Image: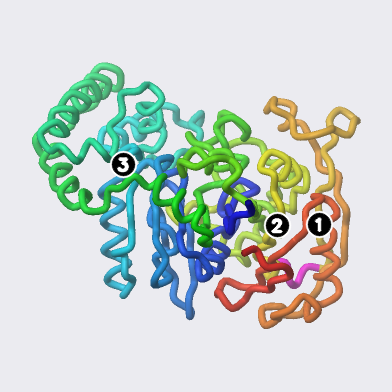
Amino acid sequence: MEYRTAAIIGSQWGDEGKGKVIDYLASCADVVVRAQGGNNAGHTVVIGGKKYALHLIPSGALHPGAVNVIGNGVVVDPAGFFEEMETLESDGVDCSNLFVSDRAHLVFPWHRAIDELSEGRAGSGGIGTTRRGIGPCYTDKAARVGLRVCDMLDAAAFREKMSARLDAANEIIERIYGAEPLDKVSILDLYAGYAERMVPLIADTGAIVYDAVTAGKAVLFEGAQGTMLDLDLGTYPYVTSSHPGSGGFIIGAGIGPRMIGEIVGIVKAYTTRVGAGPMVTELTDATGDAIREAGHEYGTTTGRPRRCGWFDGVVVRYSARINGTTGLALMLLDVLSGFDELKLCRDYAHKGETLQGFPARLDVLGACTPLYDTLPGWKSDITRCRDFGALPEAARRYVEAVEEITGVPVKIVSVGPDREQTIIREEVF
């Protein structure tokens, strides 16, 4: 049986423009599922010139009638969750059709404190976390000591479990980091209030998603960050604490692997990265600065400037292999307007040899040099183009070069931030 399902995957290091594609496809979706990550990353969606920053709540919230699901693979910070909900509702967004998995784990103030202290102690050796407590929450999950959303359903037991975990966390905060312990009473009271607000939203979301998929409804799966930040398959240790690829979506949504049909890899027309770690095509010159300013390359959540470089075909090819990508959405093509020539990395060279695949060893990756194809640029404004044929020839050649290097068809081309500035070459649903 073929299902009407699609997963939207970041095919680089995150920040690829997933929010726009998710929003575009969510207009056709009956259910939108957030499957992994936390509020350490964000999607920016532009509708009618107005920006919406989404960190935990699925993009389907911007489409009346869609069911929105926060799956079991997500770690939920109640403070950020309710703040985001209130902001959206103040903008007239209806968040009533929203469910939170009873199996999702909860982020607490001690997770944020330990994240801050750990990263601060590491100094220049830190991995560049957002200090939102996501890593420590996933650590508790893996250690089987975390608290889940379902724990909120029993108020007395929830308070008792929080008290025990806070005692353990304060011991770490005091003894290992020499910092002041967190106040127990205020945290327990605060989270008791969050629990009262959360209870009406709690559900077995895996069952909701399964029922929707088997009923033939259009279901869209979204996540945070990108494939190269995957805990297993990314540029470890400069990665996140979850699995932003298609495999992580399956587990994080609580469904079987055959239930995701289309897997759309989102890629920028160039490459960006936030934080430390090797980036073979990085440009530390005026060209890199020009791309950063033209693309407004600053983090949605942190505001940090992103590292910029030419399109890295090795990364996207690797991402396509491990995700089973069926099509690409090429974002921010308009940012490249105005350059005399453009470069795309086809392969890596290491010690005079062309590498096969993407290296696991960071010392090897850091010593690689990019092997580029060079194409002519274009000067015209492409933000008003609405079909592929309307693009200048050089822009069309660039898109075709991406397809040739990666081996994956480009189904969507974005030529601006707004929803309407989208060229659909092949429908996803």
Q: Which residue is identified by label 2?
A: 328
Report the number of discs: 3
Q: Which mark is residue 106?
A: none
Mark 2: amino acid = Leu
Q: Is residue 179 visible?
A: yes
Residue in view at x 81 percent, y 43 percent? 370
Q: Position of residue 45 (x, y in %)?
A: 48, 67
Q: Position of residue 152 (x, y in %)?
A: 20, 40
Q: Are marks 1 and 2 in contact (CB under 8 Å)?
A: yes
The residue carrying pointer 2 sits among few (fewer than 14), some (14 to 19) or many (20 or more) residues within 10 Å by Cα, namely: many
Q: CA distance from mark 1 to mark 2?
A: 9 Å
Query: From the viewer's perspective, is residue 370 above or below residue 292?
Result: above
Residue in view at x 36 percent, y 33 percent? 137
338 falls in the magenta region: yes
- For label 1, the SS is helix
Residue 369 or residue 66, whichever sits in front? 66
The residue carrying pointer 1 sits among few (fewer than 14), some (14 to 19) or many (20 or more) residues within 10 Å by Cα, namely: some
The residue carrying pointer 3 sits among few (fewer than 14), some (14 to 19) or many (20 or more) residues within 10 Å by Cα, namely: many
Instruction: Give residue 135's quadrant in the image.
Output: top left
Query: From the viewer's perspective, is residue 324 above or below residue 146?
Result: below
Tell me the magenta residue range: 335-339
Position of the C terminus by quadrant: bottom right
Residue in view at x 32 percent, y 59 percent? 84
Q: Position of residue 248 (x, y in %)?
A: 53, 39
- For label 2, the SS is strand
